[in-house]
Amino acid sequence: MSYLKSKSFQNALKKAAGVATNPDKIADLLGSVTEKMSGMDGQKQRVTEFFDKVKTMMRMLRSYISGEYREIPWKSLLMIIGALLYFMMPIDMIPDFIPLTGLADDITIVFLVFGSINEDIENFLEYEQSIKNK
């Protein structure tokens, strides 16, 4: 079964539609993700690439809600929010409380979403680089 077609991720995408139109809800989600990631610092070395991808998606959302970067297509915006909502769900395809494997589905979803919207992410990273070079 494709993780992106799983019932859990589809539920996260449905919730994403309600979150995407409300900057306060996006900001709340970003705060929750940051808090959850800070609690995972002990596992950080094993999931560094996962953390990097989540942080990139978080920067995209922050730039979007601040109005700095609005070049994110609606579908990609929903996919990013859906992936972060899925990450925040304690009970999904593999419940997070199961040692070592509990994050496997979260990591898979983030990698799949990141890959499926790679062009939009590359555009954002180029935008970030252009800001740094000014």
Image: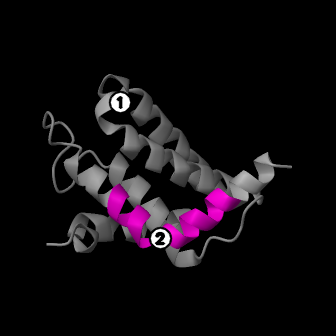
Residue at (36%, 56%) from the top-left corner? 110
Residue at (25%, 74%) from the top-left corner? 5
In the image, residue 38 above or below residue 86: above
- Which residue is at the far front? 133
Q: Where's residue 122, x and y in %?
A: 57, 64
Earlier sequence position, callout 1 versus callout 2: 1
State which region is magenta.
Answer: 110-126
Give the residue at mark 2: 117
Tag 2, which secondary structure?
Answer: loop
Give the residue at mark 1: 44
Q: Where's residue 67, x and y in %?
A: 77, 60
Label the magenta part by its dominant secondary structure.
helix
Q: Check disc 2 and give the amino acid type.
A: Ile
In the image, residue 106 above or below residue 99: below
Residue 128 appears in the picture as rendered: yes
What separation in Å lies between label 1 and label 2 (alpha carbons)?
24 Å
59 left or right of 17 in image: right
Q: Check disc 1 and give the amino acid type.
A: Lys
41 or 134, nearer to the observer: 134
18 left or right of 123 in image: left
- Which residue is at the far right? 134
Quarter in which the N terminus is drawn: bottom left
